[in-house]
Amino acid sequence: WSQSHESRSDESNEKAEPKEFPNLLSKLNENIAKLGGEVFPKLNWSAPLDAKWINNNTLKCKSARDVLLLLKSSTFVSHDIRLAEKFASKEGSHENKDGMNFCLTIALRKWCDFWPSMHFRCFVRNKRILGVSQ
């Protein structure tokens, strides 16, 4: 083991302080209340469909903490975040070298109960539906 490996090991053993985002939490809770107190969270690219197991097997969220738990637990969401980081041209930028915007947004939809067989994915371009799949 080299000296540099030992120092890196010591650094990784330090306890990371959890980050708090009070403005994000309060904004999420405010918007959840505006939408009737129950929401379906997603990013602008994908939804945390693979993480409902951690939230009593539902995607219904009643608080900011529920939303963040689902988003943090989702492989789909993690993939989107890594992809956005990969394509960002420089730190702090949301555009790649081609001018494409990769800014991620948390989207909240008012919750409604419906059967999974009624889920459809629509593909839209220039405000026109190009295709629908189930």
Image (spheres, rainbow, N blue to C red):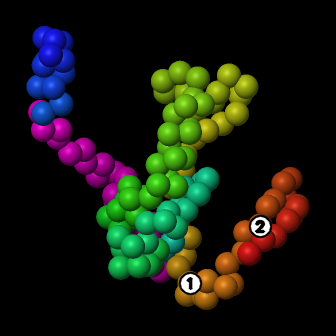
Q: Is residue 90 above or below residue 110?
A: above
Which residue corresponds to the image point at 64% horizontal and 27% vertical from the top-left? Answer: 96
Q: Quadrant of residue 120?
A: bottom right
Residue with the mark numbered 2: 122
Describe the element under mark 2 as helix, strand or loop.
strand
Q: Nearer the viewer, residue 48 or 18?
A: 48
* The N terminus: image quadrant: top left
Residue with the mark numbered 1: 112
Magenta-drawn stretch contains 28:
yes
Q: Nearer the viewer, residue 130 or 8?
A: 8
Disc 2 residue crowd, few under 14, some 14–19, many 20+, Cα 10 Å: few
Residue 41 picture location, percent across and down: 50, 66
* The C terminus: image quadrant: bottom right
Q: Nearer the viewer, mark 1 or mark 2?
A: 2
The magenta span reads 14-38
Residue 17 picture location, percent across and down: 17, 41
Disc 1 residue crowd, few under 14, some 14–19, many 20+, Cα 10 Å: few
Magenta-drawn stretch contains 100:
no
In the rendered structure, are the residues bearing label 1 and label 2 in contact, judged by CB atoms less than 8 Å apart? no
Mark 1–mark 2 distance (CA, rounded to whole Å): 18 Å
Q: Quadrant of residue 68?
A: bottom left
Residue 86 picture location, percent across and down: 55, 31
Residue 2 picture location, percent across and down: 16, 12
Residue 61 appears in the figure: no
Disc 1 residue type (three-letter): Cys
Which residue corresponds to the image point at 30% horizontal and 49% vertical from the top-left? Answer: 21
Describe the element under mark 1 as helix, strand or loop.
loop
Which residue corresponds to the image point at 50% horizontal and 43% vertical from the top-left? Answer: 81
Q: Is residue 20 above or below residue 53?
A: above
